[in-house]
Image: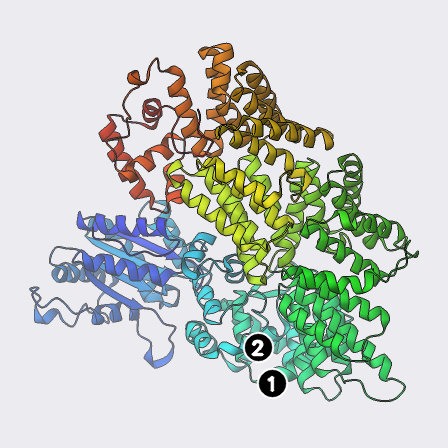
Amino acid sequence: MSEVPALAGRREEIATLTRAIEDLGAGRGTVLEVAGDPGIGKTALLNLLARLAAARGATVLRARARARSGEGAKPYQVFREAWQRSAPPTAAPYPPTAEAGPPWDTAAEHALVRALLDGCARRDGGRGSVIVLDDLHHADPASAHLVEALAEECAAHPLVLALALRPRQTPPALLAALDDASHTGRLVRVEPAPLDAAAIVSLAGRGPAEQLAAGSLGNPRALRVLLAAGHDPDQWPARSDAAAGPLLRAAAPVLAELEALPGDCAEVLAAAAVLGEPFRPSDAAHVAGYSGDRTAAALGTLAAVDLIRSDGPAGTLVFRHPVLGHLLHHRMNPGLRHDAHHRALDLLDARGAAPAARARHAEHVLPAAADPAQAIRVLAEGAAEVLAREPATAARWLRLTLDYSPTAGAGAGASAGAGARARLALDCCRALTAAGRPQEARALAHELLRTPGVLPGRLRTEALAVCVGVERLLGRYEEADATARTVVDALARPLSTPLPVETADLVFDYGLLHALRGTAAEVRGLAHEAARAVAGADEDGRTALGVLAAFCDSYVGDFTRAAPEVARCARLVDSRPDTVAGRAPEVLALLGCAELFVERFADARRHLSRGLASAGGGAHKHIAVNQLLGLSILDQWAGRLDTAQHHAREAERLAGEIGAPDAAGLAIALRSSALLWATPRRRTPEAVELAEAGLRATVPGTGWWAGSALGLLAVAKLLGGDPAACLRTLLEGGGEDLALLQPPSRTSLFALMTTAAAQCGDLAAAASAARAADAAAARLGRPAFQQAQADRAGAALALAQGDPARAAALSLNAARAFRALRMPVLRAWTLIAATPALAATHGTAAALGPLDEALEAARECGALRLCEDGARARAALTAATPASRPPDPLAALSVREREVAELAAAGLSSRQVAERLVLSTRTIDTHLGNAYRKLGVSSRVALTRLLGPPPGGLGTPVA
């Protein structure tokens, strides 16, 4: 067949349609049922089927059934229209007497079936026919019976009968007949599934794919509506008025459905849209102003046409799709919408509903309210309720309260009014920050600080704390530090007890700033003092400051003090719900990073994952960035290289959205590191270039972001074959003794320096770096990861000094530690590098065992460069002389065939290879078949045996 048009996420469905048309070409008929909810893509599949049939030269008869009654309704209406709209080919022998079509009004059903089959045969010239009937759930009874009868005959004739329908609206008798045909093999059912994330990315770009998936529920039509509305994950569906034209065009099929509703149904459905889902029938009656019986009748009609559905045994109802309710709300007359929301608000007030539920109506009532005070109060209370889980909604409500709150005037109440308004503004700043809009938060906070007399002392401290937080998020560390010090420098030491809440908040933000700048030592004492001074009743504040103090201890390398404090803080945080796990939401991220330093890796993953889950849906983007970065590091260590790249990409995207260059730079560097291990050696320059871009994106200085990116670039330089550049990178960015970099990372970086210096032939520098690595591990108490890195440094030095026995022993010690820590990449890297030492000390046979273990670990985690390095080490180990080495078996392959063969030999399936190389599975299988033919093999097992452990990973060159 010719090239099949692509429909995102519909590979299996397209294959089914293609088979039906191929069978048609062989003279075999098929009945296709395409069933699913409105907007799921049934018509798109029928369009594709029609194009495939036309490309084959088949005759296509097509029509859409419509709900009809009265004089215009005729039996077999959908068949009549299909016949009339299909003009026969001009060259086809077609008797003029047949133009009128089958005798619809006089013939019996079996005669109509015969007439249709004969007529199609005359028209199609032997190439077959396709009858496409869309929206069959609207078909008249005669058409439905004719479908059943025609389906019985299709298999024996070159005819495809394609039917699209909504099961919920299809008459039970027709559904039963189609089910029977399916069970007996006479019908092929196609049920398009909701689009997955990959399909949504292909349609909408990377952007907010997760939010689009959640908003559309994978429904293609709903997705088009969201995209046409200029979908902002933090604003839709609450507000979409700004995109009327594109929105209404994309929603035209749904709006046509709504406009056909009787008056009562339209009013009740509009009331439901105002209430939001799920809604109670009695509430819809109240908002619509109808009696219970009148509302029940309307709801019955709406359920029959599948616009509303039951939400379970409680009796509440929901829309067929959430977007339907939002469109209805968008289309309402503004005045009627205001009145309906007013009635809904009164109803919920009388019921004593939660503030958030009432605030969703108050925001529509407030602009036209005669007395806005009540609506303002409801919005403020609602914002406080949803801030942790829906910060963008909270920010919108608080903005409204500020817009409609009276400004400060004269008189006794002026001061109290100014203070209340300032508190609303500060809450709005916090919501904007949590929603990932720090620039707006900064502007509002500075506006408050500029206004004389608005902020009493404690509120001013709160405003300064907000400013410190947003300046930090924006990478403006000097401004954040200067702002915080206006309060911190004035604090009486020792701190007073109990420490005011607003002061504790500012100390926490100040400490977090220094943690990110790499100067945690400067606030370590203050953090411990503040944690002791917080009021006993302020459990959240005490937990947050305790976590900060423990982080500072771990960051500066005082593991003896940090480890028990981190464990204690973990117990405290674990006992708290997500929404109050510490005063600041950063607590989970900060705790996870501290646990990463002190080698509580499982706890670190647990807390970072928990924090990321609680910050989902666009909430707390600045926190999610930190959690994603921490998870990316843990994923790389654990050998989950694809997941590591995914987390790094997400962190990079979020950092870009909130304007955080440091976080974006580190995310890029982490992505380069995962790419370095996961891709073939020939892609090393790409990874190095990416690591350089990551370091350039960070703010120069000694902060965690820049320091971590620096270390990742040094690794890339070494693995890229430039040990001198690796040394320059570390010494220029970290200082002679790496004092500018965080202590927990120094052991591994000194190990890197040892290897680089040894490869440069500078044994004195290598010895100095190895001693420094051992001393760094000792200062940290020699925990397993740190000691393993020190052993790696010692092994590299020993090998360079001609002591293979010591090098072998230290390498095996490090490899055992990495295995216990479940770090397969580092374990494989260590064992591959140790191969010469093991062979020199214990012989070739003894060296092959650890090497094969390394290759197995590398293959299991997809570290393709390590696979390549291991293959080279194995070849060097087993070859008697360079001349006896076998020729490269891949030499006969093209570049793409070679790449596919390497990945297949690494154990990846065709689908995994396709995802890695961004190609179709069919293309991968074609390349693999060519490779089999050229290499003279017939299976993946034989391919792996021929190539040995597959090349294509990232590791240090084996000497």
Q: Secondary structure at mark 1?
A: helix
The residue located at (82%, 60%) in the rendering is: 488
Image quarter where the C terminus lies is top left
- The residue carrying pointer 1 sits among few (fewer than 14), some (14 to 19) or many (20 or more) residues within 10 Å by Cα, namely few
Q: Which residue is mark 1?
A: 336
- The residue carrying pointer 2 sits among few (fewer than 14), some (14 to 19) or many (20 or more) residues within 10 Å by Cα, namely many
The x and y percentages for residue 639 are: 53, 35
Q: Nearer the viewer, residue 628 or 94?
A: 628
Image position of 487 with respect to 191: above or below: below
The residue located at (20%, 60%) in the rendering is: 54
- Relative to 878, 600 lies left or right: right
The x and y percentages for residue 207 are: 49, 60
Q: Nearer the viewer, residue 338 or 950?
A: 950
Q: Which residue is mark 2?
A: 270
The x and y percentages for residue 950 are: 38, 28
Q: Is residue 291 visible?
A: no
Furthest residue in direction right, as rendered: 497
